[in-house]
Image: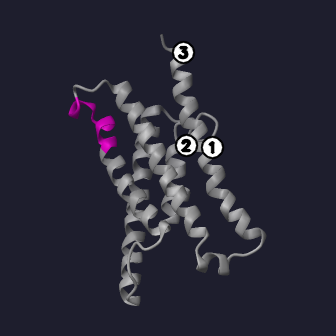
Amino acid sequence: MSLAFSFLMTEALLMFSPESSLLRSLSRKVRARCHWVLQLLALLCALLGLGLVILHKEQLGKAHLTTRHGQAGLLAVLWAGLQCSGGMGLLYPKLLPRWPLAKLKLYHATSGLVGYLLGSASLLLGMFSLWFTATVTGGAWYLAVLCPILTSLVIMNQVSNAYLYRKRIQP
């Protein structure tokens, strides 16, 4: 699940950033397809992680979703699933003919940002767990906590700037 939200989803969201993307030289259409593929891989990793967590809890005879980390993680995975299905309307805009494409893109970006922040919140909550704080200590713990905070700030900046910039250049 960490791979899904920390790496795959982060790069998928940065795909459209002119400053940050590894693939910025490609056309927007190709970057949109890469975004879709990375998001799908992120969702599959998150679902696999959720399945493994459930299996592990069952083997140990422990209750499910008893921590804020688990609850936020489940919500983030469900949100990611809804977000991926919502993205189909952008891939195939003829499926939603009554919705202007510009509004669909704005709603998709905003909803995606919320989902990404849910995933980041779940990562942060996991870093305060007894296991993580016993395993990762000292400066490494602070560095680990800083990673989702900083990437969330970068993603929020990128999403908000993209729409502010479009508003300025379009009448």
Front residue of this view, candidates 161 and 95: 161
* Disc 1/disc 2 C-alpha distance (Å): 9 Å
Which residue appears at 66% of the width and 57% of the height? 147
What residue lies at 35% left-to-right and 85% top-to-bottom? 58
Which range is magenta?
86-96
Q: Amino acid at mark 3?
A: Ile
Q: Nearer the viewer, mark 1 or mark 2?
A: 1
Label 2: which residue?
14
Look at the picture and state if 133 lies above or below 124: below
Query: What residue sits 66% from the left and 76% below the top?
Result: 133
Q: Are marks 1 and 2 in contact (CB under 8 Å)?
A: yes
**163 drawn magenta:** no
SS category of the residue bearing label 3: helix
Specify the quadrant of the image occupied by residue 74. bottom left
**Quadrant of the rendered structure where residue 95 is?**
top left
Residue 34, percent across and down?
A: 44, 45
Q: Position of residue 135 (x, y in %)?
A: 66, 80
* Badge 2 amino acid: Leu
The magenta stretch spans residue 87:
yes
> Which residue is labeled 1 in the image?
154
User: What main secondary structure does the magenta stretch of the protein show?
Assistant: helix
Q: Amino acid under label 1?
A: Val
Q: Residues under labels 1 and 3: Cα distance?
A: 22 Å
The colouring scheme, among rainbow, by chain, secondary structure or one colour, is one colour
Tell me which label, 1 or 3, sits earlier in the chain.
1
Residue 169 circle label: 3
Secondary element under disc 1, as helix, strand or loop, is: helix
